[in-house]
Amino acid sequence: MYKAMMIDEFEQLEKRNDLAIIDVREDDEYVSGHIKGAKSMPLSTLQETAESLDKAQSYYIICQAGGRSQMASEYFASLGYDVTNVMGGMSAWEGNVTDDV
């Protein structure tokens, strides 16, 4: 089971905390603008990359609108990770973005 939160609640939490954010959009989307510090793990690569995460850490999963992050959250949760799906995604994000890779 995974948790979920709306983007506005996430934005407030992100302003006050150093969060472990996983961006599951494809590489070209990530490079065009992402939340500073977010780790790129495209949904299409999760089967190969998911095990690289720390199961003791909580993660916030984001995509463009919420569909891919929901699928990723279900997958991560099935592997025993503590994840929260950020609903609304980058399309609703009002904070700063970076193109640093």
Image (cartoon, rainbow, N blue to C red):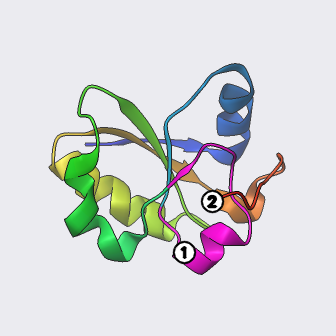
Which residue in the structure is indicated by mark 2? 101
Q: Which mark is residue 27?
A: 1
Judge the density around disc 1: few (<14), some (14-19), many (≥20) Cα neighbours within 10 Å: few
Which x, y percent locates residue 76?
26, 51
**What quarter of the picture does the C terminus occupy?**
bottom right
Q: Which span is picked out in magenta?
A: 24-39
Residue that protrudes farthest toward the left in the picture: 79
- Residue 23: x and y in percent read 52, 57
Q: Secondary structure at mark 1?
A: helix
How busy is the neighbourhood of tag 2: few (under 14 within 10 Å), some, or many (20 plus)? few
Q: Residue at x 34, y 28 (%)?
A: 57
Q: Nearer the viewer, mark 2 or mark 1?
A: 2
Mark 2 or mark 1: whose residue is earlier in sequence: 1
The residue at 62%/45% (across/down) is 6
Disc 2 vs disc 1: Cβ atoms closer than 8 Å?
no
Q: Position of residue 47 (x, y in %)?
A: 21, 67
